[in-house]
Amino acid sequence: MTGFVTTDGGCRLQYRIDGPSDAPALLLSNSLGTNVAMWDAQLVEFARAFRVIRYDARGHGASDVDRDPYPFARLGMDAVAVLDALEVARASFCGVSMGGMVGQWLGVNAAERFDRLVLANTAACMPPPQMWDARIALVRESGTGAIAPAVIERWFTPGFRERQPAEVSRIAAMLEATPAAGYAAACAAIRDMDQRAGLARIGLPVLVIVGEHDPATPPEFGEAIAAGITGAALVRLDAAHLSNVEQPGAFNANVLAFLTAELRYD
């Protein structure tokens, strides 16, 4: 099922639902510069156990482009707005990169709506701001195609790019199709984000996934998140930044094992 929800501010967000209607809900949040199709390699397996809800972050995919600046909290509130519109009281959550940043915000500000969080290839803070300013300026001037080659090099290891050129091209096309204004606005929100102080307030079960070869959010970024959240588990995958695309088998197995395991309290 595909449709749109409208946030309080009037931004329309596209969503898609797969899996049994009576299964527990699982909300997936995409990375910067992608859309709901980034989860294609997860969908079949995840939909066996969950009612899978994917949505395009604002400015991405088929969702509305917000040309005005917004704080990072707006992206977190968008995730809650999707659940509200679909009348989902509680869900599990999985996000990659920007999606993992959204998950951190949710763990602090909307914990009552979630059972467990998977935070993959992400960071609590992404300095320096000058790097983001330069990227924003380039994208606004020349579009997302201007940054695509460099971004793809960070997203995938050289070996994966050689073995899976069709998949790399599919993801690159997704990035190049992202509206420049939407991409730039999200970059600005990430530039100004610092969630490090809030990590200790996350009381939900959390799985942090890092890519051993990730130059965009290096392993130490994820290690710091896991260290800051009491009881968080950490998994390392032989991948660069989009570990769910590069290592779907290992990604899926670890996420499903975490989301479906019985909770144990010490």
Image (cartoon, rainbow, N blue to C red):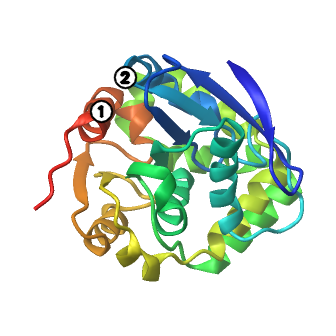
Mark number, residue 256 = 1
Where does residue 117 sit, x and y in percent of width and height? 39, 51
Based on the displayed image, in which of its 4 quarters is residue 197 positioned? bottom left
In the image, residue 194 above or below residue 203: below
Q: Residue 125 placed where, x, y %?
A: 50, 74
Q: Nearer the N terminus, badge 1 or badge 2?
A: 2
Judge by depth and name the residue closer to the eye, 261 or 238: 261
For badge 1, the amino acid type reads Leu
Location of residue 45 in the rendering, given as x and y in whole percent from the top left corner: 37, 20
Q: Are the residues tagged 1 and 2 within 8 Å (C-beta)? A: yes
Q: Residue at x 38, y 68 (%)?
A: 202
Q: Secondary structure at mark 1?
A: helix
Mark 1 vs mark 2: in front: 2
Q: 51 above or below 135?
A: above
Q: Secondary structure at mark 2?
A: helix
Residue at screen point 89% across, 51% down: 10
Q: Amino acid at mark 2?
A: Ala
Residue in the picture at 31% in, 74% down: 228
**Residue at x 49%, y 44% (from the top left corner):** 90
**Residue 71, image x, y percentages:** 72, 71
Q: Which quadrant does the C terminus fall into?
A: bottom left
Q: Is residue 171 visible?
A: no
- Dot 2 corresponds to which residue? 49
Label count reads 2
Name the image quarter holding the N terminus.
top right
Q: Quadrant of residue 261?
A: top left
Residue situated in front as seen by the camera: 70 or 158: 70
Say left or right for 263 vs 51: left
Q: Residues within 10 Å of mark 2 (few under 14, many from 20)?
A: some
